[in-house]
Amino acid sequence: MHKILSATFIAPNIKRFTIEAPKIALKRKAGQFVIIRINDVGERIPLTIADSDSEKGTIDIIVQGIGKTTMELNSLEAGDFITDVVGPLGKASHIENFGTSVSIGGGVGTAIAYPTAVALKQAGNHTISIIGGRTKEFVILEDEMKKVCDEVFVTTDDGSYGKHGFVTDQLKELIATRKIDFVLAIGPIPMMKAVADVTREKGIPTVVSLNPVMVDGTGMCGGCRATVDNKTVFVCVDGPEFDAHKVDFKTLMTRNQSYLMAEKESLEVHECNLNSLASTQ
Amino acid sequence: MAEKISNKERMKIKRQIMPEQDPLVRRNNFSEVNLGFTEELAKMEALRCIQCPKPTCVEGCPVGVKINEFIALVADGNFLGAAEKMKEDNLLPAICGRVCPQEEQCEVKCVVGKKHEPVAIGRLERFVADYERETVGIRVPSLKPNTGKKVAIVGSGPAGLSCAGDLIQMGHDVTVFEALHELGGVLIYGIPEFRLPKSIVKEEIDSLSKLGVEFKTNEVVGLTDTVDELMQNGYDAVFIAVGAGLPYFLNIAGENLNGVYSSNEFLTRVNLMKAYRFPEFDTPVFNCKDKNVAVFGGGNTAMDTVRISKRLGAKNAYIIYRRSDVEMPARAEEIHHAKEEGIEFILLSNPVEFIGDEKGWLKAVKIQKMELGEPDSSGRKRPIPIQGSEYELPIDMAVISIGNGSNPIIQKTTPDLQYNKWGNILVDETTMKTSKKGVFAGGDIVTGGATVILAMGAGRKAAAAINEYLISSNPEILN
C-alpha cells in the first residue's frame, strides 16, 4: 500500500499526486515510469514519474482523467492509499550534452517532458521548452519549466494564452532562427507525429515517449508492442523513448484504440455506480 | 500395511477414472474441469500399486517424491499420513497433482504400466493434498534451527517456491521477490482457473508464509533492486528464477493488428487480472462472444488459451498447428479435454500473414498447408510448406502461443552473469551455480520454456546447492 501525501488539480481533470514510494524515489531516472493498480479489482496502468524526492521517499505522478481508472484515481485525496506501485520501469532517457535541446510537452505530456528537461539542463544543454495546451487552463508546469529551462515558450490552440497555434509552429520558428541539436516531444500521438515530420526534414535528432496499453510492464506480455524502424519493439522494456523518425505512429494510434468499447462500458458502469451511490446518500 | 492381496488381484483392478465436469457444461464456466478422486476411488486406485522394491516411479519424479510410500498409506486409508510423506519432498502437492505431466514422468516408469495402465499417481497426489487441505488444513513441517543466513529468491513461480520451501526448512531466512502484484508466477498468470484454481495456489503459498518465508510483491529485481544490491544488502545467496517471460511472435505481416495477442497477454488479462469477470474487474480482454478465434501453437499454453476463448463465448475456436497431432507438445489430457469442449484442430497448417480491415482490426489469416518431411533437430518430423496451398480463414482474434524467450531485465542489469545466445543464464547443471559467486539460477530462465515440475526440480537442486554453499562458507552453522 502506498500513501498519497498530496493530491492537487493543476488543470481541469489533471491531478498531481505525491506518493510514498521510497525505493522507487531512490532509483528512478528521467524517462522511467511506474505501473499502478488502485485497488484489488483495478487494472494496471503505466504512468511516467514526473518528479521524485529521494530524501522524503516520494514520487510524483500527473494524471489526466480519461478512462475509468484514471478518473477513479483522480477522485483520491491526500491520505488515501494506492494498492500497488511498481517500478521504476523502462529505460531511462538517453541524456547527453547535445548543445541546444528543445523539450516539447503537449497537454499532460508536459508532465513527462519535465523530468527529461531537468536532466538535459543538468547535462549542460541550452534547454528550451515548449508547452502546448488546448486552452490556457491546460498549460501545466509552466513555473517548474521556467525554473529549470533557459527559455520557455507557451502555445495554445485557441490563443487564450501564449502564442496562438500549435507547438510545431513555435518549433518551426525556433528552427528557422537558430541551430537546434535535439528535440524531445511528448504528448498526444498526432502532436508527436507532427513534430517528427517537422524535424525529419531538418535532420534534427528527435525522441518521443510512447504510452501504449500495458499489462505487466516488464516485457512479459507483449501487449505494448509498437513498430519502430519496421521492427516490433516492446515499449515497456525497449523504451518508452524511441527515435521519433522511425516510429510507426499509425499502428500506435490504432493499437491504442483496442479497448475503446470496453473502456466505454467500464466507465458507464462506474458512473452508474457513482450515481446510485449519490442517490442513496 | 496395505491389504494383503496378490499382485494378480491388484492387476485386475482397472485404473480408476477421475470424475470431471460434463464438457458441454464446463465449456461455459471457469470452474475446475477435474473433480478429483473420492476416498473410495483413491483407495481402490492405490491398491493397484504393487509396491516395487525398487520404485522406478520415484526416479521419474524431478523432485523425488516417495511415491510408493505415500501410495501405501493411501491404500491403508491413512490419507493424512500420505500427505505428510508426500510433503517431505514436495510442499506444493495440490499444484503438482494438477499440472505435472505425470504420463511422461512418474507414470511412464510405473511397472504396472508395462502390461496394464499405470497407477494414477498424479490423481492420487492431488487427492491426498486436497484431502489434507479440506479436512485439517495444510500442516507445515518443522524447521531446522536458524542459521542466520539470508537467501533472496527472485521470482515466485514454481522454481522460486520450491527452492524457498526447502531453504526455509534447512533453517535459512528466505525472502522471495515478485515483480507482479500477486504471488505464483505462471501458476497465477498462466494456468487458468479451470485447470488450477487460484485459491489452491494461494493456500499452498500461504503454507510457505507460515513456515516463515517472506514474500515481497511489486519488486522487479534488476530495476527496483539489482542482484548486486541484494548481495550488498545482506543476502548471502541469490537464486534467480524469473521464468522465461518474453513472448515470441511469428514475425509475419499484420502481427501488430488489433486483435492479435500473445498467449502471455491473453492469459494474464484473463487469469491474473480476471478479465473474464469484466466489468466487475477493470481489465478488459478481446470480447470473444460469437467470434472466430485462432490460437497458433500446440503446447499446453495453446490449449489453455483456446479453451478460455471457448468459455468466453467464441463461436469457432481453432488450434492451428504446423505439424500433426502426433508431434503436439501438449499433454494428451489437455488435447482430449479441448476436443471434448468443441475446439477444432487445424493441423499441418502455418500462418503466413494476418489480414486486417481498414480500421486496423484483424479479419482473417492466410494459412499455408504443410507436409511432414525428415526429422529435424528436435527429433520431430520437419514441416515443409506445400506451395500454392494458401487460403484465407476468417478470424476475429488470433493468439500466438509458440513459446517464450528470456526476459532481458536481469541480463541488462546483471551483465557479469554468463548467458547463452538466447539470453538463458548458464549454470552448472548439478548445482545450478552461475558464474557469479553466491548466485544460482534455475527454471525457465535457464532451460527456456519447460514444465512446472522441471522448474520445481531445479528449485530443489538449487536449494541443496545453496545450503551447501552457505554451510561451506560458515561451517559453524552445522553445530
Image (tube, coloured by chain):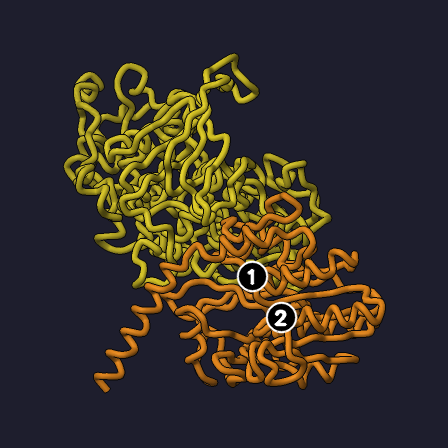
Chain colours: A orange, B yellow
Q: Is residue A53 above or below residue A91?
A: below
Q: Which residue is mark 2?
A: A112
Chain letter for the residue marked with disc 2 in the picture: A
Residue A211 is labelled as 1
| Local secondary structure at mark 2 | helix
Determine crowd level at label 1: few under 14, some 14-19, many 20+ residues with C-alpha closer than 10 A: many
Q: Is residue B355 above or below residue A93?
A: above
Question: B352 left or right of B304?
Answer: right
Give the camera-side residue of B415 and B175: B415
x%, y% of residue B151? Answer: 57, 56
Is residue A71 visible to us here? yes
Residue A237 is labelled as none
Is residue B140 visible to us here? no
Question: B289 left or right of A44?
Answer: left
Give the camera-side residue of B331 and A130: A130
- The quarter in which the C terminus of chain B is drawn is bottom right
Q: Residue at x 26, y 48 (%)?
A: B30
User: Type of residue at label 2?
Assistant: Ile
Which of the 4 image quarters holds residue B70?
Answer: top left
Chain letter for the residue marked with disc 1 in the picture: A
User: Type of residue at label 1?
Assistant: Asn
C-alpha gap between disc 2 and disc 1: 10 Å
